[in-house]
Image (cartoon, coloured by chain):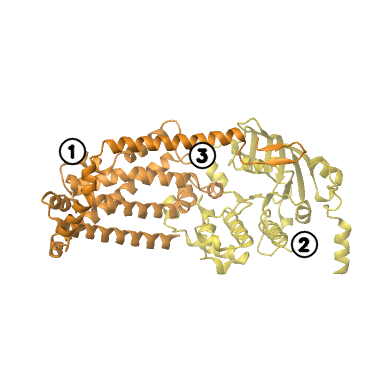
Amino acid sequence: MHWAPPVSFPCPSERKENALLLSLKSLTKTYRTGDKALVSVSLDIPKGQVVALIGPSGAGKSTLIRCINRLVEPTEGQVLLDSVDITELSSSGLRRERRRMGMIFQEYALVERLTVMENVLSGRLGYVGFWRSFLRKYPQSDVDEAFRLLDRVGLLAMADKRADELSGGQRQRVGICRALIQNPSLLLVDEPTASLDPKTSRQIMRLICELCEERGLAAIINIHDVALAQMFVQRVIGLQSGSVRFDGPPTALTPDVLTEIYGEEDWQATIRKDDEEDAEAAVA
Amino acid sequence: MPVEQIADGRKVWQKRNRREQLTHWASWFAGVAVFVYCWQQISESTTWFFVWDAPRIAGDILTRATPPKWFYINELWEPIWDTLNIATLGTLLALCLAVPTAFLAARNTTPSTMIIRPIALLIIVSTRSINSLIWALLLIAIIGPGVFAGVLAIAIRSIGFCAKLLYEAIEEIDQKQVEAITATGASRWQVMAYGIVPQIMPAFAGVAVFRWDINIRESTVLGLVGAGGIGLQLSASLNVLAWPQVSLILIVILLAVILSEWVSAKVRGAII
């Protein structure tokens, strides 16, 4: 791929590529209004795989990733994370499993009035007791890790700033740190770039994918920008009206497939062509 | 419909059509008629001789009240200190009780919408609907006259006010921040401490200072019914027609209120 993984982290080739991490079995969500957000979605995601979830607004992308960590309760079906059925868990069991699923949000969802450091450390809430977290007495190892992550995303100098003083791209980096400090095996990423400008969007996507590579994380990324998705992920899943219409490598996205997912439109300009990439490589 | 098509095909737009126009004017007419009628009724039951005489009496009292009896201030230090304490302790006590009430009343934090929320709302409405003077009268009958009755009266009266404003703030928080904290695997209490509390802190501080400011004013009159504070001196002075003392007490109350306004403005400025 485009980046070389640092030596200190497990190299992708050392991982068992096919070991299953997440498995959705006929997951269905019907809202109380009767809207069917998900209709029997079944998916398997191996360890370390970065997946883009595309589809029109209202296709159920947000509902799908929220059903995985049960921010939205699925109506039927199973969510198996390393063979643990998330849908069966009691509230304390659910909290324990949520620690393994880091979540990154569209509008960052940082606690605006807390500092950057507090926001990052809030990713450890599932591991520390109430009074320790209330008094901000986090274990030194957590604080060390928070500094390491902030340094990794280039925000070390901002640790003491309040979250609402940061720019959009910086806030999303804090959001990424908060998800990573959970030490998750899976990232659930909901429209990470929808509120960002094109350049920052690319940087954020690159950062998320690099970090997944470094740490061997799997990720499900909801994304509107098809070209951006093709640039960075290994697999694309197309969702339409709550069911999976496409599941394959980014290169297999043809105008016909996009019409199937989104409806009729001229898709030629949207799809990233491989020969462009080759031409760039030749120039370099 | 405000948009109508006239003969030559052009469209005209008016804010109201003819019927709405008529109803509009009829309502105004009815309103003015009621006002005139009421004015007449009040006028008939007023002894106009006293009203015409009022400026003379007021002038008379003003001359008797000036200059204020300045050295009487030495007897006022303690009651004004009591008044400030009644207001401050009452507000603190009210906040301690209002915070849990607000969390139980807010739709997004209440443990049960069917039972607990209505109870919390009932507490808010019932404490708010009774004036602190009336609470003071009740409490004096129960626990006897004094500062403690005043503190309790102020506290009870303030619970509803503080809890109402707080629960509205809780209902208006950004739910995405709560979602994000929940997604980390945080417990219910941690979600509250990290996802909700930081968001309502400005509202909390604003409500606390605002209510303290109101309570300073309310506690100045509690003494009228015997619940401690400077109101006691005021009613005593009024009863013996000691106008120079009354004017000094009013000046002291005015200064106390100005001071509280100044403090609350400063605090609110510092928080937001």
Instruction: Mark 1 vs mark 3: tell me if same chain.
Output: no
Q: Compared with residue A238, is residue A124 higher up or lower down, i.e. above or below?
A: below
- Write down the residue under mark 3: A91
- Write down the residue under mark 2: A2
The mark nearer the N terminus, 2 or 3, is 2
Q: Residues within 10 Å of mark 3 (few under 14, many from 20)?
A: few
Q: Which residue: 84% across, 51% down?
A: A251
Q: Quadrant of residue B85?
A: bottom left
Q: Is residue B202 visible?
A: yes
Pointers 2 and 3 in contact (CB under 8 A)?
A: no
Which residue type carries mark 2? His
Q: Position of residue B147 (x, y in %)?
A: 19, 49
Q: Residues within 10 Å of mark 2 (few under 14, many from 20)?
A: few
Q: Position of residue B165 (x, y in %)?
A: 41, 46
C-alpha separation, residue under disc 2 versus residue under disc 1: 80 Å
Which residue type carries mark 1? Ile
Nearest to the observer: residue A160 or residue B63? B63
User: What is the drawing colour of chain B?
Assistant: orange
Nearest to the observer: residue A127 or residue A265? A265
Q: Which mark is residue B77?
A: none
> Any idea which chain is the yellow one in this picture?
A
Nearest to the observer: residue B258 or residue B241? B241
C-alpha separation, residue under disc 1 versus residue under disc 3: 47 Å
Nearest to the observer: residue A153 or residue B209? B209
Give the quarter of the figure containing the C terminus of chain B: bottom left
- Write down the residue under mark 1: B142
Give the quarter of the figure containing the N terminus of chain B: top right
Disc 3, SS = helix
